[in-house]
Structure formats: C-alpha cells, structure tokens
Amino acid sequence: MPVTPRDVLAAHNVLDLASRTDGFDMLELLHDLTTYTVDLLSVCSAGITILNEAGEVDYATASDETCRRLEEDQLELGEGPCLDAARTGDALAPVLLNAAYPSRRLWPRFTLRALRVGITSVAAVPLRTPQYPFGALNLMSSGRVPTRQDLRLAQVLADAAGTCLHHRQALRTEDEIINQLETALKSRTVIEQAKGVLCARLGIGVEEAFTRLRDHARSRRQKLTALASDIAQGAVPAELDTKH
C-alpha cells in the first residue's frame, strides 16, 4: 500500500508529540494534540478535559472557541460527553446528537447547546500515561462522523502525548501527574488573559490572538506560558504589538 501525505503527516505529528525536550510547556503540548487531531481526522473541533487535584473534571484547552465554550458549558451544566469521558477513562464511541435517544437522554441540555452551534456528533478517547488515565481527548463533528480508524488514530496521538508526559517529565506517580496538570490549568488562565490583551490592543479575534501568541513563542523558542504571563502583565513584545 503506497504511503499517503496523510500517513507522513500523522507520523510527523506522533513524533512531535512524543519527543518534546525537557522542560516543555505542558499546555502547549495538549493544545498541539487538539490541533493535530483536527487536521488529521477532519473533525470540527477537539478539546482536552482532565481530572484536577480534587478529582473533578476541568477543561485544559481546545482547538477553537466553539469547543472551548462547549467544554465550559458542560462544566456549568454538570453533564456532557467530555465530562463522562474524563471521569470513566474509557473511549466514547461516536454519539449522534439529536432530539431523540440517545444523546437527548444522556445529555439533554448539552445536546441542545451543541446543536445550536452546529455540532452533530461527539466522541472521545482516553488521555493517559502508560500507567494512569488522567483525562480525555474529545472530538466534535459537524456532518461527518469519525470512523473506527479515525478513533484509533486519535488514540495513537493521545498516547504519544501521554508517553511524553511520563518520560520527559520523569513522572512516576499519579500524584505527580496531577500536580503537573494543575500547573497546566493555571497556565490556561494566564494564556486566556494574554489573548484578551491582544484582542483589545490589536482589534483581532480570540483565535487569531492565540495563533499570533503561539507563533511568536515558537519562533523565539520561548515557553508559551512565559510569553503569555509577560503579555498579561502589559509587557507586549514590539513584534506582536502591531496590527497586520
């Protein structure tokens, strides 16, 4: 069977997720996981939900604002596929969202909100290290439903990120993993603040703000969280402080 461009891209993305250098930014790793998932699986959105230190589900990051809002909606409503997937640590086969069974019975309020923004099916795979499950990679689709092969590829991507967390951070216990995730959740707040600063100063959208933030950090081999912290405190680099 000939190798396709998608095969090459998948291999590259798996390698990138699994082979970060020591001291990498965990939140950037998780965001890259959502980006690669969207690019390879042709789903609309992907997000990460994790179990925090208190054993509660929280969202870490998402590929876009629609997914982020739906993850926040689930936390507010106390129901939804992302919450279920993170709590159980199991894969969630694609579920069609409609006014009938099963989604309406499982998640009545979430289903209505998802349909309102064009999401028609959801699925998830576990996010785990070789020893411990700690969350889920959630897939949201409009029209096209992920296949079994799509979910296998999503699991490979998620496992690559989980292996990176285990080996590069030399994590050995579940408590250490949770502590690292708590740091990522705090980083998420700082990044949201930095995005808000850029939106206000440059008159751009939230997703464009994040793209510029990430590209600037990568081009200078700087941690995304460190750059976001500076911007949140008003120190916007001159290269970013321009409308273009």
Image (cartoon, rainbow, N blue to C red):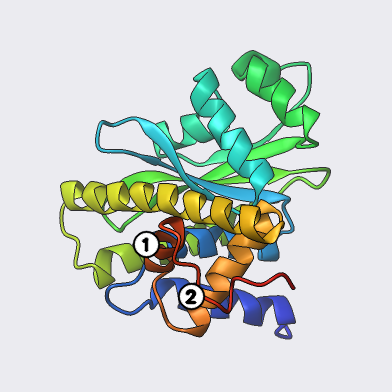
Q: Quadrant of the C terminus?
A: bottom right
Q: Measured from the top left, where is residue 64 in percent x and y? A: 65, 51
Give the secondary structure at mark 2: helix
Q: Residue at x 52, y 22 (%)?
A: 76
Where does the image place residue 200, in percent across and percent down from the top left?
A: 63, 52
Q: Which residue is mark 1?
A: 26
Classed neighbour count for the residue bearing mark 2: other residues with Cα under 10 Å, few (<14), some (14–19), many (≥20): some
For label 1, the SS is helix
Above or below, 193 against 38 in this view is above
**Label 1 packing within 10 angstroms: few (<14), some (14-19), many (20+):** many
* Residue 136 picture location, percent across and down: 46, 45
Gap between marks 1 and 2 measured at Cα: 14 Å
Q: Are marks 1 and 2 in contact (CB under 8 Å)?
A: no
| Residue 149 visible in the snapshot | no
Three-letter amino acid code at the position of disc 2: Ala
Is 158 placed above or below 96 here? below
Residue 61 locus on image (x, y percent) = 50, 50
Tag 1: amino acid: Met
Quadrant in which the N terminus is drawn: bottom right
In the image, residue 177 sits, relative to residue 86, either above or below, namely: below
Q: Residue at x 68, y 42 (%)?
A: 66
Mark 2, residue position: 217
- Marked residue nearer the N-terminal end (1 or 2): 1
Dividing the picture into quadrants, the one containing residue 204 is bottom right
Name the residue furthest right.
Answer: 143
Question: How many marks do you count on the picture?
Answer: 2
Q: Which mark is residue 155?
A: none
Front-most of 50 and 12? 50
Residue in the picture at 42% in, 58% down? 27
Judged left or right of residue 10, residue 188 is left
Residue closest to the eye, 135 or 92: 135
Q: From the viewer's perspective, is 224 left or right of 146?
A: left
